[in-house]
Amino acid sequence: MIEVRDLTHRYGNGDPDEDPDGGPVGERDGDDDDGRAGATAVRDVSLQIPDGEFLVLAGANGSGKSTLVRHFNGLLDPDEGEVLVDGEPVGDDLVAARTRVGMVFQEPRDCFVAATVARDVAFGPENLGLPREEIDRRVERALAAVNMAGRGGERIDRLSGGEQERAAVAGALAMEPSHLVLDEPFTGFDEPARESVLAHLVELNRDGTGIVLVTHDLRDVLDPADRLVVLDDGAVAVDAPPATAVEALDDLPVRRPDRPARLLERC
């Protein structure tokens, strides 16, 4: 379980690489600084995200959603409050937190560290010091989970955008996290690529991986979701099951569902 307790985070709280949306420069969710250093990015947020839940975290650009999720595995430190993963404060053991909570950023190509798919997916397990046999097992399993089995030798720079996203997800899955957090994973995707990646996330969730999907665009994503949380100006404005929550979206700056979902119902 990820537990957020009374979390507050301010822009520019001493991290020279932090952008106004809370992430490292180049991983923002759409805004410029606008001179907001010292302003509150996330204010007094409390959430519990159980294992196995499919949570959609929505909000306009600059609403604080990217800032919030970067606290889940210690990429940012709170000014007030705390985050616990499986009952342990994130800051007490960053390696454990980053093993349990996998993170896939908006621009996965900026996070690749190797030329080929398999070598990149292996990077995390290698840094855990695992035996070679275990690393190979994790790489094979992770690639199969995103429908890229047998493609480990391919160069990442020759993959399509959707394939790169799936390779990034595989890299996170190779750490065998209990939760997978994806920050705006569909940016720049055409409709088939969006549907393909979302379908794979649904399958991962059915197999037991908790999903936290960060987005400003609610097309399609509410059908597989257990819960919708919407941030507005850094605070929780909505926290409810999708069928109930969608009724409260009229006054919030998010793109509402505009057609029936196409995915199969979750089992």
Image (tube, rainbow, N blue to C red):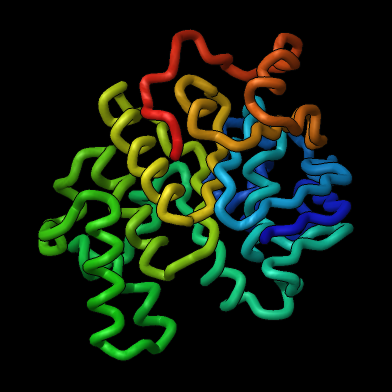
**Residue shown at the point (44%, 12%) measured from the top left:** 260
Above or below: residue 129 compared with residue 39: below
For the residue pair 147 and 32, the one nearer the viewer reads as: 147
Q: Would you say 78 lies left or right of 247 here?
A: right
Q: Nearer the viewer, residue 193 or 108?
A: 193
Image-quadrant location for residue 215: top right
Name the residue: 40% across, 50% down. 204
User: Above or below — where is 136 with respect to 185?
Assistant: below
Q: Quadrant of residue 37?
A: top right
Q: Residue at x 52, y 46 (%)?
A: 27
Along the viewing direction, whichever of 117 and 267 lies nearer the viewer: 267
Q: Residue at x 69, y 59 (%)?
A: 2
Q: Is residue 164 found left or right of 41 in the rendered image?
A: left
Q: How many marks?
A: 0
- Side of 5 where 247 appears, left or right: left
Image quarter hosting the C terminus:
top left
Q: Quadrant of the N terminus?
A: bottom right
Question: Which residue ends up furthest to the front in the rendered image?
Answer: 267
**Could you tell whether 229 is left or right of 28 in the image?**
right
Tell me residue 254's x, y (percent): 62, 19
Please, is residue 209 above or below residue 245 in the view?
below
Residue 108 screen position, x and y as percent: 38, 49
Decide if residue 58 is in sight here: yes
- For the question of whether residue 26 can be seen, the reply is no
Residue 257 in picture, x, y percent from top left: 53, 14
